[in-house]
Every structure is written in structure tokens, then in C-alpha cells.
Image: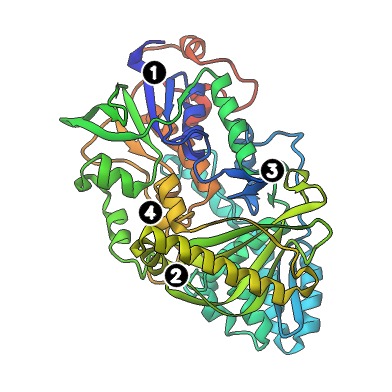
Amino acid sequence: MNNQNKVVIIGGGISGLSAGIYARLAGFDAEIYEKNSIPGGECIGWNREGYHIDNCIHWLTGTKKGTELYDVWKTVGAIADDTEFVGLDSFFTSCHNGKSITLWADLERTRREMLELSPEDADEINKFIDYVEYSKQCLIPAKKPMDMFGIGDYIAYGKSMGDFVKVMKELGSISLEDYSKRFKSELIRKMFCDYLPKQYTAYSLLVSYASIADGNGDIPMGASLQMSLRMEKRFKDLGGKIFYNKSVESVNVKGRKVSSMILSDGSRVSGDYFIATLDASILFNRLIDKKYMPKALKKAYEAPEAYPAVSGFQVAYTVDANFNPGETVFIDIAPIKAGATTIDRMYVKVYGYDPLFVKDGRQVMQTNLVQSDADYEYWKSLSAEEYKKAKEALVAAVTERIEAAFPEIVGELHFLDAWTPLTYERYCNAYHGSYMSFVTTTKGKPVRIKGDIKGIKNMCFAGQWNSAPGGLPIAVTNGKFAVQRLCRNKGYFEGKNNDERRTEGSQKESHTYDGVDALCGKRVS
């Protein structure tokens, strides 16, 4: 295939890999340029002292066969029909004053335990469980973007939402913190504000929990980096090219088109269409003029109270492989200042469920202190020496609090690594070190943008920043959607009959995501 049909993708994260794979399936040449030496963006992990530290997946939405998102994950090679999953029994456990409560995958078990804990909250508990059941109907559209929906698609989508409409009507405009106040039990109130930042809209937690309860939010065995590597293999097997350690320094816009981009080594890359899957703040503040930034995105960056970013100060240890307080357990701690925020709750997560995280009778254990925009500013203000000392002091404080909560492991914790919002900024160009998109709060309308760049005809952007709250499902679908829109809008296949289109494809696929016809949902002629 010649250069007239080349798609150049900036960024080799989940969205970039997805865009590359679907570009090849649609018959385009595709090249990915990635600043780091491995694929995956924030969906990665790394090794310390022979132990693997996972940076990303706590659960993967879209693991249930028969859902549109499952088909996307399968198409990009992230999972397969024979993929082994962890098989989560629970979402998380919250502890307070000697009592605990677990959000089990079995909703009726959760209902029973919550009612036993706080019978005075019976009405709200029953409604909560019912609403989680309704939230199973909230599935991410993944076959095609909603701007390509026809009337029939909208009707079908509306019907599929079913009773989830009731959840949105009641909980779509209140925060988790406000929702928690409906309950009399102090433990239940804390539980609702443990897993997600308390300013998140209340339905966000219910939808997340529903994924676990429905078997649609499991963890693939083999960690985050391995999933990204499977996607890289899929892209290469389709004939795509990926270039590592190739940071993009600038994009040349001439008239209303991108003519080329310049890499950090000074080399020039040309193409017909460009898909930017790097962090949107870098795209519009460094690579191209800020005047091209969509209004909705500009509004979000200018209103951090309504559109906050979320990151974390994270620590990884090894601990005895037999230590199992529960997969993810939130605990009370003596107040600790992390960045600009004082925190009195934290969690520990053990990784003994996967042999990849176990060695010599010990397993990896991690924790995360949630960090805000203000915390990012704190870390950013430090000198290199101050930064190092602050990290060391905070690690010592975190270790002390874990040991206070679990006396049986006093002296047994072995430190592996710690990372901050600046780590995400340094390696992933992440805005304020955020590993998600803007927090979905009640103060701002959720960001939903297609990724078109007004004033530039042959470039778009795709990734988790296109749709709050971001995450892997948003990243993988937006990579796909970018190519679908390209097929629809750019007339690439005009004048070619169906046989020619399939011949130009990288290879014929046996599944329903074959070529541009399936990508666009209709034939192009």
C-alpha cells in the first residue's frame, strides 16, 4: 500500500494500539510513534528485585462474553475466548472501629451482610442493592460511536438501559459524599467514599460495582503490561509498524492540514491522516496551537473545582504470600499528610491471586493515597532533593500505618518502589499526573467530545480524555471510533468496489469486525 493511505498515530498506549489495529483492519497503512520503550501508556507494570509491580488494572470492564466491549477487547487481542481470569469474589472491603463490610460479587450476600450490620438502614440498603442490579444495564456502546447512531440504534440503546434510567434520575446529580449521608451506619458512609473520590457522582460507584457483580469486570491473569504486549503483537501481526523511544516534538500545520510531524531526533514523519492519542494537554499546549482546543476541553481545564484530576502516591511492597486480609481492604489510619492533603483512610491490595506477583513464598502488596490537583502542585514545587526526601518520609509513614493495622506483619514488609503524580507526568505526559480523565462531579457537565479538531482536516485526537471519567474502556473504544469516523468522513474508499477494499485490507478476518464495512456499520461505495 502506498503513502496515500497512511495513518500516523502519536502514542502507543491502549488508545493508540486500538487505533492502529482498527486502521489496519480498515486497510490503511499504520504507524505508531511512542515516547517510551514499551507499549501500553499507563497500562503497564515494571519489575523490582524480581517482583512485578502492576500499575493499572484493578478490574477490566468488558470481560463478559456477549457484550460489545468484550468483542472490542477480543478484536484488539487484549483478551481471547480462552483467557484465564482471576474470578473476583468481591469489589472491596471497608473496615472501621473493628467492623467490616464487603461489596461481594454476590449482591444478595452483600445485602444480607449490610442488613445485619445496620438494620436501621434497611430501606436505603435494599434500594442500593436494587440500583446496583439496575446498573448492570449500563454498558459502554462499543460497536460504533453515538454520533454514527441511526434512529434504530438510539431506540435499541434506550431499551438496553432499562431500569438504569431510575439510577441516573436519582443519583446522577449528587456526589458520593452526599449519597453516603442517607445511611445511618458510619461504616457504610465511609465505604461509599473509600474507593472513588468522594466528589464523584454517586452512580459512578454503583456502575463500577455492577461490573464486578455481573462478571463484566474481572482481571485477566498476567497483569497490565502483558495485556498491552498482546495488543502490540496483534498490531504487528496485522502489518502495523510501531517505533519506540520516538517522542514527537512538534506538528506542522499548513493551511488546514497536518503536513508532517517532527520527532525528538529531528526526523520528519509524513502521513495522510494523524491520530493523536497522547494526553490532550500536551497535544494542545505543545504540539499544536492552543487555539485548536475544543471549547468543552478548554472549559474543563479552566475549572479544576468542577473538573478535578485524580492521581496517587503509591507504594509497593512484598509480604508473606499467606497474608490475605482480602483482595482490597480499606482501613482507618492515623492522619497522614500526602502532598497538600491530609488522609485518614487508605487501602492495601494483595496480588497473590496471580503467580506473576509471587516469588519465593512472598507476594506483591500495594497501596495508593489519592492525590488531587493541589497535591500535584505540591510535588511539582519541590526540588529534586526535597522530592526524594518527601517520598522517603511518606513511605516510612505509610509503612508504619500498615503495620499498625496488621500487627501480624510487623517487620515483614519489604519496600519495593514508590511513585507520585510526577511519575505519571514524566513517563506518560499525564496532565497533573492523572491516571484517569476528569473526575465526574456534580459541578460540571461530563466531558464528551468526538476528538475532531476544528481547523485541521486530517487530524483528530482519541483517548480517555475524550470522555469522562476515562479509563481503559474509554481509551480502547475511542481508538476504534477515531478510525470509524475516518472511514466515514474522509472518503478513503471512494471509487473502490468491495473486492478491492477487502484485498487492500491487511488480512481477511473471520469475525464480524472484518474491514471497513463492519467498522462503519455500512458499506462505503
**Which element type, helix, strand or loop, lies under badge 1?**
loop
Task: Tell me where residue 300 appears, x and y as whole percent.
Answer: 33, 60
Q: Which mark is residue 493?
A: 1
What percent of the width, then of the height, locates residue 193? 58, 74
Would you name the residue on which mark 3 appears? 50
- Give the side of residue 309 with respect to residue 99, left or right: left
N-term mark: 4 or 2: 2
Amino acid type, residue under disc 3 in the picture: Gly
Give the number of the mark in front: 4 or 2.
2
At 71% from the left edge and 62% from the top edge, which residue is drawn? 413
Image quarter for residue 364?
Answer: bottom right
> Which amino acid type is marked by label 4?
Tyr
Residue 28 quadrant: top left
Q: Earlier in the sequence, mark 4 or mark 3?
A: 3
Residue at x 64% of width, y 37% of height: 226
Q: Residue at x 65, y 86 (%)?
A: 186
Whether tag 4 and tag 1 are in contact, CB under 8 A, the answer is no
- Residue pointed to by mark 2: 339
Cα distance between the residues tagged 4 and 3: 31 Å
The amino acid sitting under disc 2 is Gly
Pointer 1 with pointer 3, Cβ within 8 A:
no
Residue 496 can be seen, yes or no: yes
Q: Which residue is mark 4?
A: 431
Cα separation, mark 4 vs mark 2, equals 17 Å
Give the number of the mark in front: 2 or 3. 3
Say whether marks 2 and 3 touch (CB < 8 Å): no
Q: Is residue 333 left or right of residue 517?
A: right
Can see residue 94?
no
Q: Residue 74 in the image: x percent, y percent?
A: 64, 34
Are circles 4 and 3 on residues that touch, CB within 8 Å? no
How far apart marks 1 and 2 lie (CA) works out to 53 Å
